[in-house]
Image (cartoon, rainbow, N blue to C red):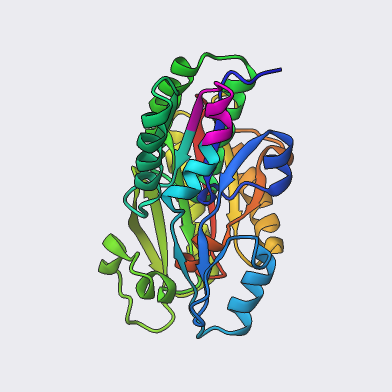
Amino acid sequence: MKEVFHIISDGSCDLPDDYVAENNVTVVPFYVAFNDGVYFKEKQGMSVREFYQKMVDEPKNFPKSSMPSVQDYVDAFMPFVEEGTPVVCICITSKFSGSEQSARVARQMVLEDYPDALIEVIDARINTVLQGLYTVEAVRLRDEGVPFEEAVQRLLDVRSTGRIFFTIGSMDYLRINGRIGKVATLATSRLGIRPVITLKDGEIFPSGIGRARKKTVNKSLELLLNYVKEVKATPKDYELVIGYGYDIEEAKEWRREIIIRLAEIGFSIHEAAIRLWQIGAAISVHTGPYALGVAILKHA
């Protein structure tokens, strides 16, 4: 059966491979490289797990990333344009990457030859596993048969509800790869300081600091609880996911704690309802191997 529309996302979405395959989503990968300067497509040169292991084993070998090219997006669009299927393309916040611009240029190139093609490029204003949740919402709308134009509008309407509350192992990766931004106001030069960061409206904001990992993880959870109370979120209306880097066991333990604390404020949810998704290589370039966070998004 022909799709109502096809969903494309750049690799920032960090969706598991099995989800992508089972739900017919096209992912346009970023390029990543270590100090040898040889770029390869994420997941194609080495697995995400291997990428993290190299970061852990070689802590001074800071990797870097590069956005998908215009041609990458043209190649992704064309099979669906040629069959007359509308396309919804979801890209990482434009404040972090030029991926969305590459997609828009590709769209214009395609429209020159196929002026009737329907391609909507969305600046998600979010990234990583939160972008993954956003893409899952697009899948849900598609599978429910929601028309293209309505689905796009509903996706745009919920963009501003997305939040990630997270901590990282150190500031080094954000600093070296130029993604500190407003977080630069933190005491980055103080040995052992770990930040707590909020991602909203396409930017990252400092939300606290701590020396102990437990303290910054707890602060991230407190930020989630405050947001749930602020927007009066319910499990029916909002979806959560935990994003983790190298250590899945830490993520599992944190999920159990999150469920207990959410229940205390009336947000009762089963463990399986909060999925654990590994943050991909392209994002880990900026967050390092020890990122841990929780994302929340309202259903479209």
Q: Nearer the viewer, residue 21 or 86?
A: 86
- Residue 188 visible in this rendered orientation of the protein: yes
Residue 121, by quadrant, is top left
Please tell me which residue is depicted at 46% across the width and 49% down the height of the picture. 71
Please tell me which residue is depicted at 51% across the width and 62% down the height of the picture. 31
Place of residue 21 in the rendered image (x, y in percent of width and height, measured from the top left) = 72, 40
Please tell me which residue is depicted at 41% across the width and 77% down the height of the picture. 172
Place of residue 20 in the rendered image (x, y in percent of width and height, measured from the top left) = 67, 41
Q: Is residue 217 magenta?
A: no
Place of residue 134 in the rendered image (x, y in percent of width and height, measured from the top left) = 51, 36
Tell me if residue 193 comes above or below residue 48 in the rendering.
Answer: below
- Residue 265 visible in this rendered orientation of the protein: no
Please tell me which residue is depicted at 50% across the width and 73% down the height of the picture. 212
Q: Nearer the viewer, residue 198 or 178?
A: 178
Tell me if residue 223 comes above or below residue 244 in the rendering.
Answer: above
- Magenta-highlighted residues: 78-88
In this rendering, position of residue 271 left or right of residue 206: right
Residue 252, by quadrant, is bottom right
Q: How many marks?
A: 0
Place of residue 86 in the rendered image (x, y in percent of width and height, measured from the top left) = 51, 23
In this rendering, position of residue 50 left or right of residue 142: right
Instruction: Name the quadrant of the N terminus.
Output: top right
Q: Is residue 80 magenta?
A: yes
Residue at the extreme front? 113
Q: Nearer the viewer, residue 8 or 165?
A: 8
